[in-house]
């Protein structure tokens, strides 16, 4: 017997016969990547309003925050997935509001990766403390009371519609 065929049969028995459909990973129109659900929200809010909106997510998704981007691969996923609707700047969950030049993600993730544009962050006039992503994927600090589209990220979602327990 062909070893590739045997390997496929063994993997099928180990991992089961059914694959998890995409709607079981994240509800529509959310997108799944690396155990998280993402949505690009196309109405404008301030940074704090957007974070609050993500904290109170609809559609059975809960406990979200403005997106934390922890790697170039995650950034590439976001750009590839949301590029068609990303015509303007988009809030991400990075801020130095509490202490200048000490950036933190609103979800508490460690800041190990950044993608600031040239000459950024510049804290123009001492008032820019919230980060948005430009169409090119580069980041810029901006006025927190400005408005922008935003991306929410959540790792929690109600699986009842797929016959699975809550996670």
Image (tube, rainbow, N blue to C red):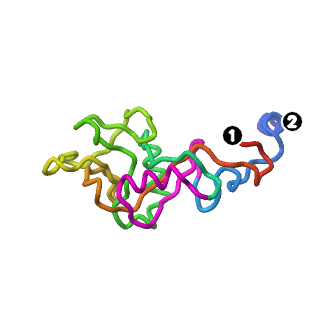
The 10 Å Cα crowd at callout 1, few under 14, some 14 to 19, many 20 or more, is few
Task: Return the residue at label 1.
Answer: 167
In 3D space, how far apart are the residues under numbered discs 1 and 2 (Cα atoms)? 40 Å
Task: Return the residue at label 2.
Answer: 1
Q: List x then y, in percent, for residue 55.
A: 50, 49
Q: Given the current orientation, which residue lies at the most extreme left position?
A: 125
Residue 50 included in the magenta stretch of the image: yes
Between 150 and 56, the one nearer to me in the picture? 56
* Span colored in magenta: 32-58
Quarter of the figure with residue 104: top left
Between 83 and 43, the one nearer to me in the picture? 43
Residue for point 86% across, 35% down: 1
* Residue 157: mark in rendering: none
Q: Given the current orientation, which residue lies at the most extreme right position?
A: 1
Dot 2: element: loop
Residue for point 43% across, 51% down: 51
- Determine whether, in the image, residue 119 is placed left or right of residue 137: left
Judge whether 45 appears above or below 141 on screen.
below
């Amino acid at each position: 017997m062909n070893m590739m065929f045997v390997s496929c049969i063994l993997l099928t028995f180990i991992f089961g016969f059914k694959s998890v459909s995409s709607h079981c990973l994240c509800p529509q129109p959310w997108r799944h990547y690396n155990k998280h659900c993402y949505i690009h929200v196309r109405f404008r809010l301030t940074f704090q309003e957007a974070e609050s909106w993500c904290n109170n997510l609809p559609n059975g998704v809960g406990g979200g925050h403005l997106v934390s981007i922890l790697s170039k691969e995650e950034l590439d996923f976001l750009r590839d997935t949301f590029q068609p609707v990303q015509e303007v700047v988009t809030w991400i969950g990075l801020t130095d509001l509490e202490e200048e030049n000490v950036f933190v993600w609103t979800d508490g993730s460690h800041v190990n990766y950044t993608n600031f544009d040239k000459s950024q962050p510049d804290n123009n006039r001492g008032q820019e403390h919230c980060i948005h992503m430009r169409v090119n994927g580069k980041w810029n600090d901006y006025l927190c009371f400005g408005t922008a589209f935003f991306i929410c990220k959540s790792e929690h979602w109600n699986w009842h519609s797929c016959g699975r327990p809550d996670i």
